[in-house]
């Protein structure tokens, strides 16, 4: 059956459907090539050399009722099997271990493998200029190690 009126919709609907089919390729490319912000400077504390990297520069988000910011910690020196527990928080001072252990969702605690430790760093909803990134590590012998990083300017809200 021939169309008597060649409207714009009839002319371009095939082209539109082709574009819609190509969009997943763009999203696949973006998901396979993520862009992360620069890592923070390496700090040595005890036997460990640690490089933290935020996953993004977005503000802290709410996770199980607690505001958190995601980080990847890479241990370039030291044996992570000697760590009993480690946690990360963003604030004016390091959080006490008794406060961190009260969280039911495991927020703040390091978890992962020797290739990288993931952590949901406990934070305030707004990160201020007075805040710092604090890492606290407890070894199996009870020794407490602390490291501090300044908040990079792009992370400030």
Image (cartoon, rainbow, N blue to C red):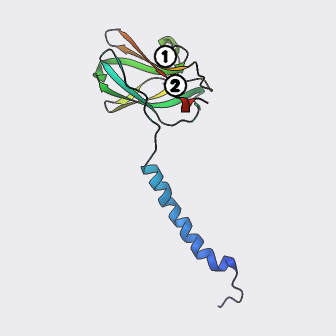
Is there any visible trace of residue 147 in the rendered image? Answer: yes
Visible residue check, residue 105: no
Q: Nearer the viewer, residue 82 or 8?
A: 8
| Callouts 2 and 1 close, C-beta under 8 Å | no
- Give the secondary structure at mark 2: loop
Question: SS for tag 1?
Answer: helix
Tag nearer the camera, 2 or 1: 2
Image location (x, y in percent) of residue 14: 58, 76
Q: Which residue is mark 1?
A: 101
Q: Choose between 39 and 2: the one closer to the eye.
A: 39
Work out which quarter of the rendered image holds the N terminus and state it: bottom right
Q: Residue at x 43, y 49 (%)?
A: 33
The residue beneath circle 2 is: 151
Which is more toward the observer, 83 or 150? 150
- The part of the image, by quadrant, that contains residue 2 is bottom right
Q: Earlier in the sequence, mark 2 or mark 1?
A: 1
State the residue lying farthest toward the top. 142
Neighbour class for label 2 at 10 Å: few (<14), some, many (≥20)? some
Above or below residue 39? Residue 86 is above
Q: Residues within 10 Å of mark 1 (few under 14, many from 20)?
A: some
Image location (x, y in percent) of residue 88: 47, 22
The answer to whether residue 89 is left or right of residue 142 is: right
Q: Position of residue 117 (x, y in %)?
A: 38, 29
**What residue appears at the point 44 percent right and 20 percent down from the top-left corner?**
87
Q: How many marks?
A: 2
Position of residue 70 in the picture relative to residue 46 (left or right): right
Residue at the (36%, 32%) spot, across then down: 116
Q: CA distance from mark 2 to mark 1?
A: 24 Å
The image quadrant where one finds the C terminus is top right
Q: Can you tell which mark lies on residue 115?
A: none
Q: Position of residue 77 (x, y in %)?
A: 28, 24
Residue shown at 54% from the left, 35% from the top: 57
């Amino acid at each position: 059956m021939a169309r008597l009126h060649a409207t714009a919709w009839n002319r371009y609907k095939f082209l539109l459907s082709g574009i819609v089919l190509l969009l997943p390729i763009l999203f696949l490319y973006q998901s396979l090539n993520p862009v992360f912000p620069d890592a923070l400077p390496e700090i040595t504390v005890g036997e460990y050399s640690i490089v933290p990297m935020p996953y993004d520069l977005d503000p802290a988000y709410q996770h199980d009722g607690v505001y958190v910011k995601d980080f990847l910690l890479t241990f370039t020196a030291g044996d992570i099997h000697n760590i009993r527990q480690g946690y990360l928080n963003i604030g004016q001072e390091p959080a006490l271990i008794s406060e961190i252990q009260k969280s039911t969702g495991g927020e703040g605690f390091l978890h992962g493998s020797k290739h990288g430790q993931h952590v949901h760093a406990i934070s305030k909803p707004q990160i201020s200029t007075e805040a710092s990134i604090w890492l606290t590590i407890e070894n199996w012998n009870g020794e407490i190690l602390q490291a501090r990083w300044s908040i990079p300017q792009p992370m400030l809200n």
